[in-house]
Image (cartoon, rainbow, N blue to C red):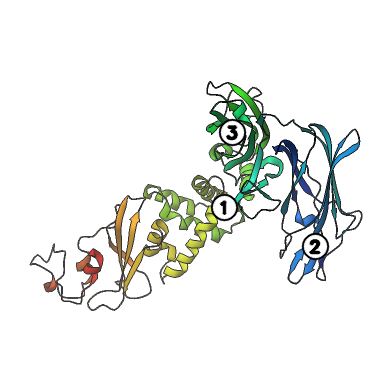
Amino acid sequence: MRYIISFLFPLFINGLYAQQLPDSPKLSAYIEQVAYQAEGRPYSEVHLSIDANTINHTQIDSLIQGELEITIAYLQNDTVVHFNKSMVSTPLTKTPTNFFIIKRTGIAKAGEYDMQIFIKDLKNTFNTFNHNEKINIRPNIAGISEPLLLANKQFSNTGGDLEKNGFILEALPYNFYSKDKSQLNAYLELYDLNSVFDKSYIVSYMVVELSDKNATKPLIIQHKNMIADTYSPILLKLAIDQLPSGNYKFICSVRGRDLKEYYSSSIEFQRSNPYLNLEEQVELTYEDRSKFLDQEFVGKLSDEELHFSILAIAPLVDKSDGDIINATLSNPDKKARQLYLFNYWVNKQPINPELAYNAFMEVARAVDQTFRSGFRKGIETDRGYIYLKYGQPNDVIKEYNEPDAFPYEIWSYNGLKVKGQTNVKFLFYNPSKASQDFLLLHSTCYGETQNPRWEIELYRSVSSTQMEGSDYRNGTRMQDNGFRNARRYFEN
């Protein structure tokens, strides 16, 4: 049961969100109604999601607040049987913020009703919302409620109209899963199943294509063992990150241990997943591909930002793909560079590549500033490379004035999951003593620079006679004169 009224964008004038004119577009709300049972009688639960940009607000100090009057009537044969009227103040916020309301009404008798909802903006009596629909209230018998698809759920023990069974449950507007949603969450209730099953039963829940009328080809299916009881509210979840864009049905059924189906309920939903199987999707004409990329985050990047973004991911790609990075950076076709960057982040985070990109670039920009030298960008330096590839070290030792040694740093990582190693160390040094261009001299990390003569190189400003042993060509250690600390730092 999904409905929408056209949007209104109010003006802000002299501290008051302006009154709407009588011919303005109407207030916008989303309605979802579900019937439940409690204490031997059915009741109707109405979820209302209000678009805050379509109501008027009053300024209260530095915040704003709106007020609504909500009336819900249940009629049979044009006669009002049940009536629920209330005043609601919106949350105090700095800017218009969408919010939701839940209204529950006890229903004395099962049957079909005309549900009429009227919402009035008390800051402007011309701004109203009307909605009518037929609903069916089932008798208070054993069975299963309709599923309620959720936009959000959170624990709560504060009570109030929004709370139910220790949770605040927000209905998913229009039962639409956008590209940034990777999980389907649903709430439903089971009633008096201890009168049907001796001990336990199975709840099966699945997703099928809308065209699969008999649900013979579930795309996703899971099962949950349940103990038979008089009342069992349950929250169910399914991963839908690999579910293609399309129209689907979520089905929940109650089965005995013999797998016979006793009860079933379902709800339709729509899924948008444009990044799934992207390689097949972008086999388009150049014009279509350009339009596709222009709508994504890569389409907003300048040439300079695009170049920097591709350069920043170089530490993250396999070394064998270094030539691809270089070829992409030098490619004069901007759309080809956009596509490369977009594909990279879609593969990293198919649900929300822009979010992953933005989080990484925040780090990359900080790394670039921190390690920038007079010769190259901070992300191109050895320290920038290691930081972007392995993250922030657990410990850093900086020695810029140790006698006999070039300035050096030792970075320590407690563990690197990507390498399956613990106690990993990197030693950077600055043989030029100019700028901040520290070079990676040695490490204990698999696949990175390892130089057994690193100590000789670090202290090469002193005579080779101060090496340990007499093999000056192949020696690997310097004599410990009490001031040379690099090996102690590195090995401890």
Among the 4 quarters of the image, the one containing residue 113 = top right
**Residue 253 visible here:** no
Where's the C terminus, which quadrant?
bottom left
Amino acid type for the residue under numbered disc 1: Glu
Q: Secondary structure at mark 3?
A: loop
CA distance separating discs 2 and 1: 33 Å
Q: Secondary structure at mark 1?
A: helix
In this view, the residue in front, 276 or 170, is 170
Return the disc, 2 or 3, that comes first in the chain's sequence.
2
* Left or right for 44, reference 199: right
Is residue 397 in sight in this rendering?
Answer: yes
Q: CA distance from mark 2 to mark 3?
A: 47 Å
Ranked by sequence position, the earlier of labels 2 and 1 is: 2
- Label 2 environment density (alpha carbons within 10 Å; few <14, some 14–19, many ≥20): many
Q: Residue at x 56, y 24 (%)?
A: 256
Which residue does the numbered mark 3 point to in the structure image? 229
| Picture coordinates of residue 278, whole percent (x, y) | 55, 40
Position of 189 relative to 397 (above/below): above
Q: Which mark is residue 354?
A: 1
Between circles 2 and 3, the one closer to the viewer is 3
Q: Quadrant of the N terminus?
A: top right
